[in-house]
Image (cartoon, rainbow, N blue to C red):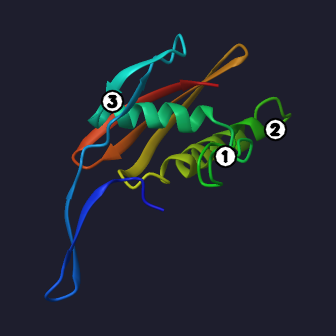
């Protein structure tokens, strides 16, 4: 399933489908600190918002989303698992949640840092000719 909007044109003479260009993807702006919505975002800001929402949304829990949307980090949090398992499963789980969006080409270079009862995860998301640094707290 593609999330990237494309201008698709059918040439009636040759009956070929021609993909013209990727159109901008505007979405409602979400203030992640207050939870309030207002205005719109596009481009990198829209992708960053998708990343935040996809990681924070539990997969399979909300009927409004299909089974591809969301992340399964909740299955790992609070479990008695080894550090080695967390270091392999958290990057895999986050990457699985993000590659659903066709705009995201790669998710790479994960770094996990544990401080007290918090786990900080930083990584990079490749989008076209841009690299977006991401940091999340689990």
Q: Secondary structure at mark 1?
A: helix
Picture coordinates of residue 57 (x, y %)?
63, 35
**Labels 1 and 3 touching (C-beta < 8 A):** no
Q: Earlier in the sequence, mark 1 or mark 3?
A: 3
Of the numbered discs 1 and 2, the one sitting upstream in the chain is 2
Question: Is the residue 42 above or below the residue 69 in the image?
Answer: above
Which of label 1 and label 3 is nearer to you?
3
Which is more toward the observer, 55 or 42? 42
Q: Nearer the viewer, residue 62 or 55?
A: 62
Q: Quadrant of residue 115?
A: top right
Label 2: how many Cα within 10 Å (few below 14, some 14–19, many 20+): few
Query: In the image, what residue occupies the spot 29% across and 34% down?
Result: 42
The crowding category of the residue bearing disc 3, from other C-alpha atoms within 10 Å (few below 14, some 14 to 19, many at least 20), is some
Alpha carbon of mark 1 to alpha carbon of mark 3: how far? 27 Å
Q: Which residue is depicted at the point 33% across and 29% down?
A: 45
Badge 1 vs badge 2, beta-carbon distance below 8 Å: yes
Q: Residue furthest front?
A: 12
Tell me the residue that label 3 is attached to: 45
State the SS at label 3: helix
Q: On residue 81, which mark appears?
A: 2
Residue furthest left in the image: 13
- Measure how far apart labels 1 and 2 are at the Cα level: 10 Å
**Label placed on residue 89:** 1
Q: Which mark is residue 57?
A: none
Q: Which residue is painted at 74% across and 42% down in the image?
A: 61
Q: Which residue is located at x 34 percent, y 46 percent? A: 126
Label 1: how many Cα within 10 Å (few below 14, some 14–19, many 20+)? some
Task: Determine the secondary structure under disc 2.
Answer: loop
Residue reaching furthest right?
A: 80
**Camera-side mark, 2 or 3:** 3
Rendering coords of residue 58 (x, y %): 69, 38
Residue 50 drawn above or below residue 127: above
């Amino acid at each position: 399933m593609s999330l990237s909007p494309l201008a698709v044109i059918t040439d009636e003479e040759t009956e070929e489908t021609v993909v013209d260009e990727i159109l901008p993807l505007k979405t409602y702006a979400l203030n992640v600190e207050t939870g309030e919505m207002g205005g719109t975002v596009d481009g990198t800001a829209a992708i960053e918002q998708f990343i935040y929402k996809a990681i924070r949304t539990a997969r399979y829990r909300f009927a409004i989303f299909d089974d591809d949307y969301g992340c399964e980090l909740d299955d790992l949090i609070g479990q008695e698992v080894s550090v080695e398992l967390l270091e392999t499963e958290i990057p895999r789980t986050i990457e699985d949640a993000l590659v659903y969006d066709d705009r995201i080409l790669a998710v790479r270079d994960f770094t996990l840092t544990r401080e007290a009862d918090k786990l900080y995860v930083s990584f990079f998301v490749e989008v076209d000719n841009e690299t977006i640094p991401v940091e999340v707290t689990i």
